[in-house]
Amino acid sequence: MKKGKKHRLRSRTFRSYIISYASVVMIALAMLSLMAAWQLSVRMRNETARVTAARMYTILEDLDSQFADIRIMAVELASLEEFSQDYVEENKYHEIELLEHLKKYYSSNTIWDYYFLKFQGNDNIFTSDGTTMPLQVHLRQYLDEESCEKATALIEELCTGAEDALILLKNEGKPAFFMYPLEKYALTGGGRGILCIEIPEDSLEARMERIAGRLEGKLTLYYDGTRIYGEEASGEGILERRTDDGRIRTIFRPEGGSGFSWGNVFAAKEWLVLLAIALMLLCMALIAAWRSYRPILEIIRKYKVSAEDSREGELDDIDTLIGGLLRRDEQNTRLLQEQYQALREQTIRLISKGGWSEGLRGRLPMLNLHLETSSFCRIRCFLEPWEGMTDKEEAGEWKETLRRDAEELSDDGVWLYPFWGEGGVLNILAAVSEEYQAEEAEEALRALFEARGITAAISREKICHDLRLINRDGGRDIMAEENGEISRNPERGNDSEAWPWKRASGQESEDDAGIEETSETEEGAGDFILPSGKKRSTALRAVRYIEENCTKYDLSLDLVAREFHITATYLCRLIKQQTGESYKEYLTGLRVRAAKEMLREEEASVADVCQRTGYTNVSHFIKVFQKSEGITPARYRDECRKGNVSEKDEKGQ
């Protein structure tokens, strides 16, 4: 019995089972753990950003209140008689009284601790400390000689009168000088001087930390565009907030990188729980491996394999047999995939020949075919590089890659199903929701061939709305193509497939001209009929007609096409060439611009604007407007009334 266990442990198959099951379990566990950890880290980072933004808002509101208190104080000082220049200069006692009055405003604000008054024609300043000193002596504490002279000249100029109500002077690392001309703040009369508030950076830092706590990062504060605290901040990951009037602005740059750390994701207990789960899953993997290996043990018992060393080779033979069976399963899977692809291609080929029947409808979902659209057509692509392909294996790989690339061009409402015909012709069964999308599919194929460096002529047949009628006129061409009767070089014959090549190279016979005229008349693709000047004239008239009638609710693509006696597909192409946009995009842009003009100039409700711009559903109108402009019509109207959006801005946009 012990030797039997020895044989089982030596089995390569059993070991491979254990390794496979355990590997799958560990990989899945690792991926789930990483995903959970990363999502948790992202949520933590987002929550940190949200809290930081809230704290920045708190700082802005507090600073706005502090600066409002300073302005109130400037109004009081400028309006009281005892702070006027005439009253102070009457006698020395009034000057002493002024210094006493200045002291009582000393602690009325918490972001500054020093200020002074400067009157016109007086070299001395009156400080909040209750002292007087020459202005230049005070400024030299913070400024060099040249800057001191400029600041003195600026203050003297402000004493005589200023256009602005606040002048801000700031040097790197020095206090910010907020200078308020008394003439601007006096309720009556008006003084001839300035009130200068000095706000050092350490006072701002202490105030912000007391209000919102310490922020882990670098904070920069601007007032009226002048940096009064912190360093210049730039780069990625910064947060910016400002007050409603825009005067105070803060920028915060967090420290470190992404903030991801395993230590702040899993605690020690959570790591132990994760390890216990991993061990439990490994045990389950061992049990599953044992259950999978039990059929091999049954084979061993059936053949009564002994535990002698001379018979140990039979276990290896069984392992070899099992390994061969596993490899055969892989081959069978590939074979099934090839058969599935062949069946799918045969079905597409059958439908393209006009062999559609109701019996095929139930098989379409199994073959992953979407043919529930309203329009169908067949596109044929004649590829020139095929003649230079000599290696059959390389050619097969090239054909399969190109077929797969063409099928991947399928998009919402457009499904392309390519298959190869004889002579290197790539046939594509196109199922589209709207007729103009067939033209877009054709353009996408041209772009694909151009990107792959392939010279190709593309022929698109007439669009039909019933799969039973597809290629009704071109069935003979498909059969000829299937039988190899169509030449890969159309210049060697005059078959029906030759005309696309001749059209591309400029060669055209009388029969070919007749084919072109018939095809273009049916499909509405007037590239080969209308001269370029007439095409441009038609396009301009169509665009002008759409602009004049864009607010009519029933202005459809078919209606405009009937107005100019052309097909909807051809009209869509003309509009695309003229405006660079599809019909729907162009019409939506015109209607949104008309709506914006009404909202900007008229006292109309959103419902009225909706009806007057060609929309019948208000919810749909709001959704279209918001997608185009980023805000709702009502919000846009309010912004226009507030003056945040002007006609000049609209033209600039």
Image (cartoon, rainbow, N blue to C red):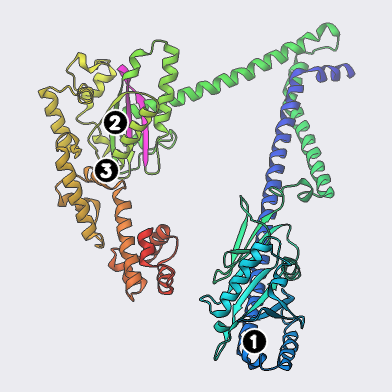
Disc 3 target residue: 577
Q: Residues within 10 Å of mark 1 (few under 14, many from 20)?
A: many
State which quadrant residue 453 falls in.
top left
Residue interval drawn in magenta: 414-430
Q: Which disc number belongs to residue 77?
A: 1
State which quadrant residue 68 falls in.
bottom right
Number of numbered discs visible in the structure rendering: 3
Residue for point 39% across, 30% down: 406
Task: Between label 2 and label 3, give the one nearer the viewer.
Answer: 3
Q: Nearer the viewer, residue 43 or 3?
A: 43
In the rendered image of this protein, does residue 193 appear above or below residue 620? below
Q: Nearer the viewer, residue 330 or 484?
A: 484
Q: Secondary structure at mark 3?
A: helix
Q: Secondary structure at mark 2?
A: strand
Disc 2 target residue: 379
Q: Nearer the viewer, residue 176 or 532?
A: 176
Task: Give how far across and how far down residue 182 sits, in percent.
Answer: 59, 83
User: From the image, which quarter does the C terminus lie in?
Assistant: bottom left
